[in-house]
Image (cartoon, grey):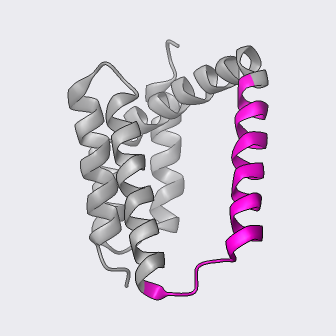
Amino acid sequence: MPGVGGGRGRAWSSRCLCLVQKGFVGLGFLVGGSSALTAVFYWFVTNLSEAIAEYWKYLVGYSMVAGLISFAVIYRWGGVSNPRTFDLIRWFMQLVGLVLVYSSTSYVMISLAMIFIALFTYHTPMR
């Protein structure tokens, strides 16, 4: 992975200047170093493609089982119509997602940083 961060990061910075002209998130992205973001994205895509190639049977099986269970529950009892129930389901799914993010890596600080970024971006109002 040598050479991934520097040149591509500077190219991303120059491209993002025209896309993000205002706002705290754009400034944080540009100041925070897009070369590090590019390197992490490259590492993620490389490892994701290897994981999908190796565990594709489990991915297909999980998708089929989860889809069938969801279909059976909604077919039997119908969809959620109460807004409070919908909120409870959404909050539970968000909590499960945060727990999965935390337990998905052995680097605790990276997991906590990802959770913090997710919570911060979720609660930051859009302009």
**Relative side of 44 to 26, left or right:** right
Give the residue displayed 36% in from the left and 63% down from the top.
Answer: 26
Frontmost residue, 110 versus 23: 110
**Relative side of 127 to 108, left or right:** right
Give the residue displayed 29% in from the left and 46% down from the top.
Answer: 115
Frontmost residue, 6 versus 39: 39
Give the residue displayed 27% in from the left and 68% down from the top.
Answer: 24
Residue 39 position, x and y percent, is 47, 28
Residue 70 drawn in magenta: yes
Residue 18 drawn in magenta: no
Give the magenta part as a residue range: 58-83
**Relative side of 65 to 111, left or right:** right
Q: Main secondary structure of the magenta part?
A: helix
Residue 30 position, x and y percent, is 34, 52
8 up-or-down from 15: above or below: above
Frontmost residue, 17 versus 125: 125
Residue 7 position, x and y percent, is 50, 30
Frontmost residue, 25 versus 121: 121
2 up-or-down from 126: above or below: above
Task: Name the outermost residue toward the front.
Answer: 76
Q: Residue 40 appears in which quarter of the rendering?
A: top left
Tell me the quadrant of the picture where the C terminus can be found: bottom left
Give the residue displayed 38% in from the left and 33% down from the top.
Answer: 36
88 up-or-down from 14: above or below: below
